[in-house]
Image: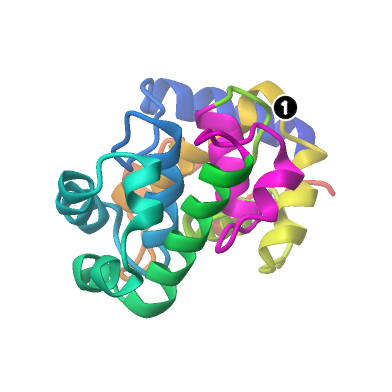
Protein backbone atom coordinates (compact mmCIF):
# COMPACT_ATOMS: atom_id res chain seq x y z
CA UNK A 1 0.00 0.00 0.00
CA UNK A 2 1.43 3.37 -1.01
CA UNK A 3 1.23 6.34 1.32
CA UNK A 4 -1.43 7.89 -0.91
CA UNK A 5 -3.54 4.72 -0.68
CA UNK A 6 -2.94 4.49 3.05
CA UNK A 7 -3.99 8.12 3.49
CA UNK A 8 -7.28 7.58 1.66
CA UNK A 9 -8.05 4.46 3.70
CA UNK A 10 -7.28 6.26 6.97
CA UNK A 11 -9.48 9.18 5.95
CA UNK A 12 -12.44 6.92 5.18
CA UNK A 13 -12.13 4.92 8.40
CA UNK A 14 -11.84 8.02 10.56
CA UNK A 15 -14.90 9.48 8.82
CA UNK A 16 -16.92 6.46 9.92
CA UNK A 17 -15.49 6.57 13.45
CA UNK A 18 -15.90 10.34 13.92
CA UNK A 19 -18.56 11.55 11.48
CA UNK A 20 -18.80 15.01 13.05
CA UNK A 21 -15.43 16.67 12.54
CA UNK A 22 -15.17 20.07 14.14
CA UNK A 23 -12.83 22.27 16.12
CA UNK A 24 -12.94 21.67 19.86
CA UNK A 25 -12.42 25.36 20.60
CA UNK A 26 -15.71 27.22 21.12
CA UNK A 27 -16.24 30.30 18.95
CA UNK A 28 -18.98 32.06 17.03
CA UNK A 29 -16.87 34.70 15.30
CA UNK A 30 -13.55 34.44 13.48
CA UNK A 31 -11.69 36.79 15.80
CA UNK A 32 -12.66 34.65 18.78
CA UNK A 33 -11.06 31.61 17.20
CA UNK A 34 -7.95 33.71 16.64
CA UNK A 35 -7.87 34.53 20.36
CA UNK A 36 -8.64 30.99 21.47
CA UNK A 37 -6.03 29.34 19.30
CA UNK A 38 -3.37 31.64 20.79
CA UNK A 39 -4.49 30.74 24.30
CA UNK A 40 -4.49 27.04 23.44
CA UNK A 41 -0.69 26.90 23.16
CA UNK A 42 0.43 24.53 25.95
CA UNK A 43 -3.11 24.53 27.33
CA UNK A 44 -6.14 22.31 26.86
CA UNK A 45 -9.00 23.43 24.64
CA UNK A 46 -11.39 22.70 27.51
CA UNK A 47 -9.67 25.20 29.79
CA UNK A 48 -9.48 27.80 27.03
CA UNK A 49 -13.23 27.47 26.45
CA UNK A 50 -13.85 28.32 30.10
CA UNK A 51 -11.37 31.20 30.32
CA UNK A 52 -12.58 33.03 27.22
CA UNK A 53 -16.10 33.30 28.65
CA UNK A 54 -14.82 35.88 31.15
CA UNK A 55 -12.65 37.56 28.52
CA UNK A 56 -15.54 38.06 26.09
CA UNK A 57 -17.94 39.10 28.83
CA UNK A 58 -15.65 42.02 29.62
CA UNK A 59 -14.42 42.71 26.08
CA UNK A 60 -17.18 41.62 23.66
CA UNK A 61 -15.68 42.69 20.33
CA UNK A 62 -12.43 43.42 18.51
CA UNK A 63 -12.51 47.13 19.31
CA UNK A 64 -13.05 46.55 23.03
CA UNK A 65 -10.27 43.97 23.25
CA UNK A 66 -7.94 46.22 21.24
CA UNK A 67 -8.52 49.01 23.78
CA UNK A 68 -8.13 46.75 26.81
CA UNK A 69 -4.96 47.20 28.90
CA UNK A 70 -2.61 44.29 28.37
CA UNK A 71 -2.41 43.84 32.13
CA UNK A 72 -6.18 43.32 32.35
CA UNK A 73 -6.11 40.76 29.54
CA UNK A 74 -3.28 38.96 31.30
CA UNK A 75 -5.25 38.72 34.56
CA UNK A 76 -8.07 36.93 32.77
CA UNK A 77 -6.02 34.60 30.57
CA UNK A 78 -3.41 33.66 33.19
CA UNK A 79 -5.02 30.25 33.89
CA UNK A 80 -4.07 29.24 30.32
CA UNK A 81 -0.38 29.67 31.12
CA UNK A 82 2.15 32.01 29.50
CA UNK A 83 -0.23 34.83 30.36
CA UNK A 84 2.12 37.72 29.72
CA UNK A 85 3.12 36.73 26.19
CA UNK A 86 -0.37 35.56 25.24
CA UNK A 87 -1.96 38.78 26.47
CA UNK A 88 0.61 40.84 24.59
CA UNK A 89 -0.01 38.95 21.36
CA UNK A 90 -3.79 39.11 21.68
CA UNK A 91 -3.69 42.85 22.31
CA UNK A 92 -1.38 43.52 19.36
CA UNK A 93 -3.39 41.23 17.10
CA UNK A 94 -6.71 42.93 17.90
CA UNK A 95 -5.16 46.35 17.25
CA UNK A 96 -4.06 45.21 13.79
CA UNK A 97 -7.51 43.79 13.01
CA UNK A 98 -9.09 47.08 14.11
CA UNK A 99 -6.66 49.37 12.30
CA UNK A 100 -5.91 47.42 9.10
CA UNK A 101 -8.81 45.03 8.50
CA UNK A 102 -11.93 46.89 9.74
CA UNK A 103 -12.18 44.47 12.63
CA UNK A 104 -12.26 41.42 10.35
CA UNK A 105 -9.91 38.45 10.24
CA UNK A 106 -8.09 38.31 6.88
CA UNK A 107 -8.78 35.26 4.71
CA UNK A 108 -5.25 35.19 3.32
CA UNK A 109 -2.79 32.67 4.76
CA UNK A 110 0.26 34.94 4.49
CA UNK A 111 -1.64 37.85 6.03
CA UNK A 112 -2.58 35.63 8.97
CA UNK A 113 1.05 34.64 9.47
CA UNK A 114 1.95 38.31 9.93
CA UNK A 115 -0.38 38.65 12.91
CA UNK A 116 1.31 38.49 16.35
CA UNK A 117 1.31 35.00 17.82
CA UNK A 118 -0.06 33.33 14.68
CA UNK A 119 1.99 30.48 13.24
CA UNK A 120 1.27 28.00 10.49
CA UNK A 121 -0.85 25.75 12.71
CA UNK A 122 -3.11 28.62 13.78
CA UNK A 123 -3.32 30.07 10.28
CA UNK A 124 -4.29 26.69 8.82
CA UNK A 125 -6.95 26.19 11.49
CA UNK A 126 -8.53 29.54 10.66
CA UNK A 127 -8.30 29.02 6.91
CA UNK A 128 -10.02 25.64 7.19
CA UNK A 129 -12.61 26.26 9.89
CA UNK A 130 -13.56 29.87 9.25
CA UNK A 131 -13.08 30.19 5.51
CA UNK A 132 -13.55 26.61 4.35
CA UNK A 133 -10.26 26.58 2.45
CA UNK A 134 -7.75 23.69 2.18
CA UNK A 135 -5.82 23.37 5.42
CA UNK A 136 -3.66 20.95 7.35
CA UNK A 137 -3.27 21.63 11.06
CA UNK A 138 -0.16 19.93 12.41
CA UNK A 139 -0.80 19.94 16.14
CA UNK A 140 0.74 17.42 18.53
CA UNK A 141 -2.00 14.84 17.88
CA UNK A 142 -1.52 15.08 14.13
CA UNK A 143 2.26 14.76 14.32
CA UNK A 144 2.12 11.80 16.70
CA UNK A 145 -0.56 9.89 14.81
CA UNK A 146 0.68 10.33 11.25
CA UNK A 147 4.09 9.06 12.37
CA UNK A 148 2.60 6.07 14.16
CA UNK A 149 0.27 5.22 11.29
CA UNK A 150 3.07 5.52 8.74
CA UNK A 151 1.84 8.47 6.69
CA UNK A 152 5.16 10.18 7.41
CA UNK A 153 8.45 8.62 8.45
CA UNK A 154 10.01 9.99 11.62
CA UNK A 155 9.23 13.63 10.88
CA UNK A 156 8.54 15.75 13.96
CA UNK A 157 8.93 19.33 12.74
CA UNK A 158 5.40 20.72 12.22
CA UNK A 159 6.06 22.47 8.91
CA UNK A 160 7.79 19.41 7.44
CA UNK A 161 4.91 17.19 8.53
CA UNK A 162 2.48 19.65 6.96
CA UNK A 163 4.39 19.68 3.67
CA UNK A 164 4.55 15.87 3.61
CA UNK A 165 0.81 15.57 4.23
CA UNK A 166 -0.05 18.06 1.50
CA UNK A 167 1.43 15.53 -0.95
CA UNK A 168 -0.87 12.67 0.07
CA UNK A 169 -4.02 14.19 1.63
CA UNK A 170 -6.66 15.50 -0.82
CA UNK A 171 -6.94 19.29 -0.19
CA UNK A 172 -10.67 19.15 0.50
CA UNK A 173 -10.11 16.52 3.22
CA UNK A 174 -7.25 18.14 5.12
CA UNK A 175 -9.11 20.24 7.68
CA UNK A 176 -11.62 17.60 8.77
CA UNK A 177 -8.94 14.89 8.69
CA UNK A 178 -6.86 16.83 11.21
CA UNK A 179 -9.87 17.36 13.48
CA UNK A 180 -10.53 13.62 13.43
CA UNK A 181 -6.90 12.96 14.36
CA UNK A 182 -7.46 15.09 17.46
CA UNK A 183 -10.46 12.99 18.49
CA UNK A 184 -8.62 9.76 17.77
CA UNK A 185 -5.50 10.98 19.56
CA UNK A 186 -7.44 11.83 22.69
CA UNK A 187 -9.61 8.73 22.82
CA UNK A 188 -7.53 5.92 21.33
CA UNK A 189 -4.04 6.73 20.08
CA UNK A 190 -3.05 8.51 23.26
CA UNK A 191 0.24 10.14 24.18
CA UNK A 192 0.51 9.83 27.95
CA UNK A 193 -0.58 6.19 28.16
CA UNK A 194 -0.03 3.27 25.85
CA UNK A 195 -2.33 3.62 22.83
CA UNK A 196 -5.46 1.48 22.93
CA UNK A 197 -4.56 -0.42 19.77
CA UNK A 198 -7.04 -3.21 20.44
CA UNK A 199 -9.99 -0.87 19.87
CA UNK A 200 -8.41 1.19 17.08
CA UNK A 201 -10.21 1.30 13.73
CA UNK A 202 -6.80 1.52 12.04
CA UNK A 203 -5.06 -1.35 13.83
CA UNK A 204 -4.74 -3.56 10.74
CA UNK A 205 -3.17 -0.85 8.59
CA UNK A 206 -1.13 1.02 11.21
CA UNK A 207 2.64 0.85 10.86
CA UNK A 208 3.01 0.87 14.66
CA UNK A 209 1.38 -2.56 14.62
CA UNK A 210 3.94 -3.85 12.16
CA UNK A 211 2.10 -3.08 8.93
CA UNK A 212 4.52 -1.54 6.47
CA UNK A 213 3.60 0.97 3.78
CA UNK A 214 5.64 1.93 0.74
CA UNK A 215 7.03 5.42 0.60
Residue closest to the eye, 133 or 157: 133
In this view, the residue in front, 94 or 133, is: 94
Whether 80 is drawn above or below 150: the answer is: below
Who is closer to the viewer here, 200 or 95? 95
Left or right of 128? Residue 45 is left
Residue 142 point in image, percent of width and height: 54, 52
On the image, which quarter does residue 166 sit in?
A: top right
Quadrant of the rendering where the N terminus is positioned: top right
Residue 120 placement (x, y as % from top left): 66, 54
Part of the protein shown in magenta:
101-130
Q: Residue at x 37, y 61 (%)?
A: 39
- Give the residue displayed 52% in from the left and 55% down from the top: 93
122 part of magenta stretch: yes
- Residue at mark 1: 171
* Residue 210 visible within the image: no
**Residue at the spot 82% in from the left edge and 39% down from the top edge:** 167
* Residue 2 falls left or right of residue 28: right
Colour mode of the rendering: rainbow
- Label 1: how many residues lie within 10 Å, few (<14), some (14-19) or many (20+)? some
In the image: residue 213, left or right of residue 12: right
Q: Residue at x 69, y 48 (%)?
A: 151
Q: Is residue 52 left or right of residue 204?
A: left
Amino acid sequence: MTKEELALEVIERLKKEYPLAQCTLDYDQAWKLLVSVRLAAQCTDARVNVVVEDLYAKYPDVAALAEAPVEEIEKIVRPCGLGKSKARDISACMKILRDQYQGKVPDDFNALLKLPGVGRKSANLIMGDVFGKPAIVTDTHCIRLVNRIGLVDGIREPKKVEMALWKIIPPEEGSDFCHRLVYHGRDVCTARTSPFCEKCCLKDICQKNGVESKK
